[in-house]
Amino acid sequence: MEVSVLNIKGQETGRKVALNDAIYAIEPNDHAIYLDVKLIMANQRQGTAKSKERSEVSGSTRKLGRQKGGGGARRGDINSPVLVGGGRVFGPKPRDYSFKLNKKVRQLARKSALTYKAQENALVVVEDFTFEAPKTKEMVEILKNLKVSDKKTLIVMPGADKVVYLSARNIERVQVMAATALNTYKVLNADVMVVAESALAVIDRNLTK
């Protein structure tokens, strides 16, 4: 599969790049995508939710009423879960939500996500670019030239580029990411991917090794 290379003015350069069929033209595996996205979201959870059980609630342990003869159920201390202000039964405790997923499954998920983007023609390859200093106005102009300014856009750079990152930071629905940090969730969450030409080689290296 070949894609035209555009410059930052949105014009065709006359060159084309061949996308690796082993990454952008596979049979997508939806279950692998589901597992990888589930892993990514689970890893972002703090897992700090906590409620107090009856032994942790502050209150007297005095027995409130006699054991028998009261005409109602047996009543223990004021911290009982059946009373207002008492402890909670089986409440949340701090826990780790992360789990293990095989490296090959995660690779398959990323390939499947990229294949979907290629099938939807939501992959724009642009010549390598950067700025001398952070300029949000210039980044907005580039997005307009590429006709993606009204879409949720993921800009993929070959490496960490702080100037480009700062230029896009204040633009709504635009995110900049290094090719080495690319993950399934970010790919699927974007309407369109703008990929710097040399970032393609980095993606190939990461997903075919």
Image: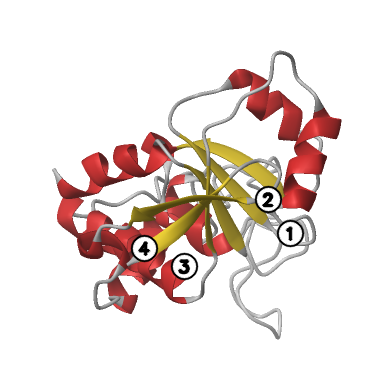
The quadrant in which the C terminus is found is top left
Which residue appears farthest toward the front when viewing the image?
A: 14
Q: In this view, does 121 lie above or below 36?
A: below
Image location (x, y in percent) of residue 120: 50, 75
Please indicate whether residue 4 sits to the left or right of residue 113 in the image: right
- What numbered label is drawn on residue 2? 4
Q: Which amino acid does label 3 sit on?
A: Lys
Rounded to the nearest whole Å, what is the CA distance between mark 3 and mark 4?
14 Å
Q: Distance between the residues labelled 1 and 4?
A: 20 Å
**Which tag is nearer the camera, tag 3 or tag 1?**
1
Kindly state the secondary structure of the residue where label 3 is placed: helix
As measured in the structure, the alpha-carbon distance from the residue carrying label 1 to the one carrying label 2 is 8 Å
- Separation (CA) of disc 3 from disc 1: 16 Å
| Amino acid type shown at disc 4 | Glu
User: Is residue 136 depicted above or below 147 in this figure?
Assistant: above
- Looking at the rendered image, the disc whose residue lies closer to the viewer, 3 or 4, is 4
Which of the two labelled residues, at mark 1 and mark 4, occupies the earlier sequence position? Answer: 4
**Does label 3 or label 2 sit earlier along the sequence?**
2
Pointer 1 and pointer 2: residues touching (CB < 8 Å)?
A: yes
According to the image, label 3 marks what residue?
117
User: For the point 66% across and 80% down, which residue is it?
Assistant: 69
The 10 Å Cα crowd at callout 3, few under 14, some 14 to 19, many 20 or more, is many
Residue at which label 2 appears:
10
**What kind of element bears circle 4?**
strand
Residue annotated with mark 1: 147
Q: Give the number of the mark in front: 3 or 2.
A: 2
**Under tag 2, what secondary structure?**
loop
**In the rendered structure, which disc, 1 or 2, sits on the residue that comes first in sequence?**
2
Q: Earlier in the sequence, mark 3 or mark 4?
A: 4
Q: What residue type is labelled 1?
A: Lys
